[in-house]
Amino acid sequence: MDEALRSLTERVRAEAAASGREGASAQCERLVATEDADVLAVALTEPGLPLWARELVAFRLGCAGDRRAFEALVLLLNHRDPARCASAAHALARLGDPRTARAAAALATNELRVAYALQPVRLLVELRAPEAVPALITTLRRRLRPHDPYRRVALACVEGLGTLGDARARPVLTEALAHPALAETAVHALARLPQPRAKA
């Protein structure tokens, strides 16, 4: 069991035990123990499945590359609980579904859900998909407004654009230099971009 699965398993076991639902802990142990992807997939669509169980099942399927988990993982990627977002991002990065980057970009740039955009931004950087740089530029530019409260999202965008090293990010990273909370990270990100060619 890898560290991400171990951490998730401990968390959902605690949630199941605290739920007060009869048989919840036993259900949790069955879902942890089974190695049958079809059993997990059936459980994923079971009516009334508790959120902790849906997360566990989707995570296990996603990490195994089973695309039946895609929709559930995308919903969890935008969840208000940061731990669920992080586990969904981890599984989506391993799922190998070509729809993942497009979904992450849509979530990262959805201004109505910007409070939950941190993990979609980080996922885009990990995927290095064509959608990543335009989405991060869009999200960061919106975060450069005065008194924007989403500094962690802005920082993730700045760091991510540095990691991706795409010259298209230079203008928005240069703008970020004027923001004290982002300036140091922006300097490092700009240093990782290809240097502009000198004019002849």
Image (cartoon, rainbow, N blue to C red):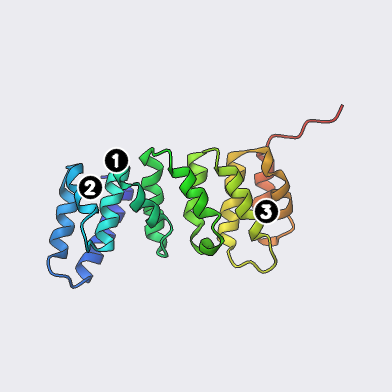
Taking the image as shown, residue 139 lies to the left or right of residue 48, namely right
The quarter of the displayed image where residue 191 is located: top right
Give the structural element (helix, strand or loop) at label 2: helix
Residue depicted at x 12% and y 65%: 23
Q: CA distance from mark 1 to mark 2?
A: 9 Å
Disc 2, disc 3: CB below 8 Å?
no
Name the kind of residue labelled 3 in the image: Glu
* Residue bearing the label numbered 3: 184
Sequence-wise first label, 2 or 3: 2
* Residue bearing the label numbered 2: 41
Front position among marks 2 and 3: 2
In the depicted view, which residue is nearer to us: 8 or 106? 106
Residue depicted at x 16% and y 49%: 33
Q: Residue furthest right?
A: 200
Give the structural element (helix, strand or loop) at label 3: helix
Name the kind of residue labelled 1 in the image: Asp
Disc 1, disc 2: CB below 8 Å?
yes
Give the structural element (helix, strand or loop) at label 1: loop
23 is higher (above) or lower (below) than 172:
below
Would you call the spot at circle 2 few (<14 residues within 10 Å), some (14-19), or many (20 or more)? some
Q: CA distance from mark 2 to mark 3?
A: 46 Å
- The picture places residue 100, in percent across and down from the top left corner, at 43, 44
Sequence-wise first label, 1 or 3: 1
* Residue bearing the label numbered 1: 66
Residue depicted at x 17% and y 42%: 36
- The picture places residue 81, in percent across and down from the top left corner, at 40, 64
